[in-house]
Image (spheres, coloured by chain):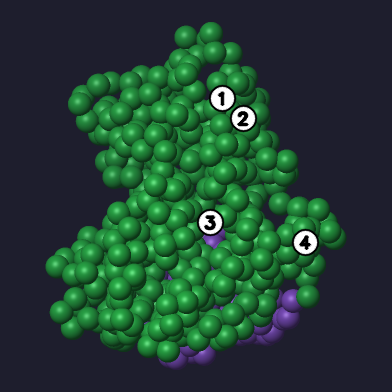
Chain colours: A green, B purple
């Protein structure tokens, strides 16, 4: 029997396990999955929780429901991987030997890495929506908040779902309008990037949205510390931004065991070939989803398209054949813009989000890089597709690599 | 795509003056771009950062983040802000002939 170990049973791990039990000869393979958390969170839903659009119950299901019956699931913390010995050591000292390893433990937030964030004011005047509990606590806060300066700060890139902070601000604009207190709320976006939109065409097409919604951008703001007593954040170049309510997107990093195993870069992401997802160092370790260092968005969409191509490539690799260097960093994301509207963006490693129609060129019905009601409905409808199609390992009727058909350059 | 001549060499640049082909970069170009960014003289400390960033970008295909630079080149974030005041990630990327640090939109 060949042994495959999959670390992580979130979006990427669940999708790939469901694919592999169908493509591998299961009488010859033993697949073991490890995850410390029995709950599978629908992370795209966290954005909606602070505004009461979703509740906690809309954002999770038991992991066990989505793990194929042929797979052995272990609920455990991972101590480390010993890649030279082809084995994984769990926190309880259980040893799992493998012929092949798939790392799919994603990324998580580390608020402790920024002084002042995770101290006395965490959960009071400092919040996050990048965790289930954080999103719920923020919903409680926003429900009764009387207004003031709301600052959204991204500590450092890369982060999961890079458009989420902007979506949060646009939804906040809508939410405070609806509550009748928009005139008492200032919305500020402090980002380490040079602007809210950094790709030329998106910048040209979308900057009006922030102007229209009166969202102020504080660009190139690299936070050094929060001062929870004075209610301000301070950057390395000593700029200060005061807040009444800070919504932080804390530092995102890969799992700690990656660092302990010497597998990761400075943020515990595993360096891989960006077209095949094979580890640069070990020819029997693949990394799927947010856990790798590929220069794509950290998003379930990227994991999904990568895994569409992974199945066949893995078989080729097992047979000793060259893998197709196919994955192009393709992502396809709905972007909420508030007031029941949304945008849709489709892009890859080299092609920036462009205007157009999707998925049928010229027809749509979705509009790319343009606000529409249908895009918002698509985002809400996606939750059903996530649980019933993607997490079951089924394919969407969409090509895995990005297509230029139906897109145009201005 | 626009071109411009920097330090006697014609190179491709984008609308914001970032070089688009790292292979066209030279040290002389770096000196000149640094002056445009308000850095009159590139010291050894600057060069350590620039050279690390070029190697990093060659591997990853994109300009490094601040944390990649501080960890990889062994400078603190504070020092980096002193070397390349006001926006080191962007300044380093421009002087090192790499693309502008970008998000997904």
- Against A88, residue B23 (above or below) is below
Residue tagged 1 = A20
Between the residue at mark 4 and the residue at mark 1, the CA separation in whole angstroms equals: 33 Å
- Against A404, residue B39 (above or below) is below
Q: Position of residue B42 (x, y in %)?
A: 41, 82
Asked whether the beta carbons under mark 4 and mark 3 sit within 8 Å of each other, the answer is no
Between the residue at mark 1 and the residue at mark 3, the CA separation in whole angstroms equals: 24 Å
Q: Give the residue drawn at x 48%, y 30%.
A: A66
Which labelled disc corresponds to residue B99? none
Nearer the N terminus, badge 4 or badge 1?
1
In this orientation, does residue B91 appear?
A: no
Q: For residue A397, which quarter of the picture?
A: top right
Q: Are marks 1 and 3 on the same chain?
A: yes
Q: Position of residue A193 (x, y in %)?
A: 47, 74
Asked whether the beta carbons under mark 1 and mark 3 sit within 8 Å of each other, the answer is no
- Against B101, residue A229 (above or below) is below
Q: Residues within 10 Å of mark 2 (few under 14, many from 20)?
A: some
Residue tagged 4 = A357
Helix, strand or loop status at disc 1:
helix
Between the residue at mark 1 and the residue at mark 2, the CA separation in whole angstroms equals: 7 Å
Which tag is nearer the camera, tag 4 or tag 3?
4
Between the residue at mark 4 and the residue at mark 3, the CA separation in whole angstroms equals: 21 Å
Residue tagged 3 = A297
Q: Residues within 10 Å of mark 3 (few under 14, many from 20)?
A: many
Q: Give the residue drawn at x 29%, y 61%.
A: A137
Nearer the N terminus, badge 4 or badge 3?
3
Nearer the N terminus, badge 2 or badge 3?
3
């Amino acid at each position: 029997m060949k042994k495959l170990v999959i670390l992580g049973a979130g979006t990427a791990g669940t999708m790939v396990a469901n694919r592999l039990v169908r493509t591998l000869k299961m009488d010859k393979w033993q697949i073991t999955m490890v995850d410390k958390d029995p709950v599978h969170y629908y992370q795209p839903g966290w954005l909606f929780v602070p505004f009461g659009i979703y509740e906690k119950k809309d954002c999770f299901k038991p992991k066990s429901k989505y793990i194929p019956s042929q797979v052995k699931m272990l609920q455990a913390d991972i101590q480390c991987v010993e890649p030279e010995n082809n084995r994984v050591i769990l926190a309880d000292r259980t040893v799992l030997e493998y012929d092949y390893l798939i790392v799919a433990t994603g990324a998580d937030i580390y608020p402790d890495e920024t002084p002042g964030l995770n101290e006395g004011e965490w959960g009071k005047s400092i919040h996050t929506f990048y965790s289930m509990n954080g999103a719920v606590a923020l919903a409680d806060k926003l429900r009764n908040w009387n207004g003031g300066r709301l600052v959204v700060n991204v500590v450092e890139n890369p982060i999961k779902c890079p458009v989420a902070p902007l979506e949060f601000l646009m939804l906040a604009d809508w939410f405070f309008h609806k509550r009748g207190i928009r005139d008492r709320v200032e919305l500020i976006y402090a980002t380490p990037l040079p602007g809210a939109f950094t790709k030329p065409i998106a910048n040209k097409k979308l900057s009006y949205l922030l102007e229209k919604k009166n969202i102020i951008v504080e660009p190139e703001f690299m936070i050094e510390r929060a001062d929870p007593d004075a209610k301000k954040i301070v950057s390395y170049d000593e700029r200060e931004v005061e807040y009444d309510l800070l919504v932080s997107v804390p530092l995102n990093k890969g799992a700690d065991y990656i660092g302990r195993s010497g597998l990761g870069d400075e943020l515990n992401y595993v360096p891989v070939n960006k077209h095949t997802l094979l580890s640069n160092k070990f020819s029997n370790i693949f990394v799927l989803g947010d856990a790798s260092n590929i220069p794509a968005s950290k998003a379930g969409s990227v994991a999904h398209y990568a895994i569409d191509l992974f199945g066949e490539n893995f078989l080729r690799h097992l047979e000793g054949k060259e893998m197709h260097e196919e994955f192009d960093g393709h992502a396809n994301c709905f972007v909420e813009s508030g007031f029941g509207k949304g945008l849709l963006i489709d892009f890859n490693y080299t092609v920036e989000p462009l205007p157009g129609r999707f998925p049928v060129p010229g027809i749509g019905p979705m509009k790319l890089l343009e606000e529409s009601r249908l895009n918002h409905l698509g985002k809400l409808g996606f939750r059903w597709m996530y649980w019933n199609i993607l997490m079951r390992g089924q394919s969407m009727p969409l090509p895995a690599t990005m297509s230029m058909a139906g897109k145009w350059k201005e | 795509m626009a071109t411009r001549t920097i330090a006697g060499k014609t190179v491709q640049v984008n609308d914001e003056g970032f070089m688009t082909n790292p292979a066209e970069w030279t040290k002389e170009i770096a000196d000149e771009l640094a002056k445009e960014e308000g850095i009159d003289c590139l010291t050894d400390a600057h060069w350590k950062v620039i050279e690390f960033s070029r190697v990093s970008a060659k591997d990853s295909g994109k300009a490094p983040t601040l944390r990649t630079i501080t960890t990889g080149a062994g400078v603190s974030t504070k020092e980096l802000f002193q070397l390349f005041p006001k926006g080191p990630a962007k300044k380093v990327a421009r002087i090192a002939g790499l693309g502008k640090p970008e998000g997904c939109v």
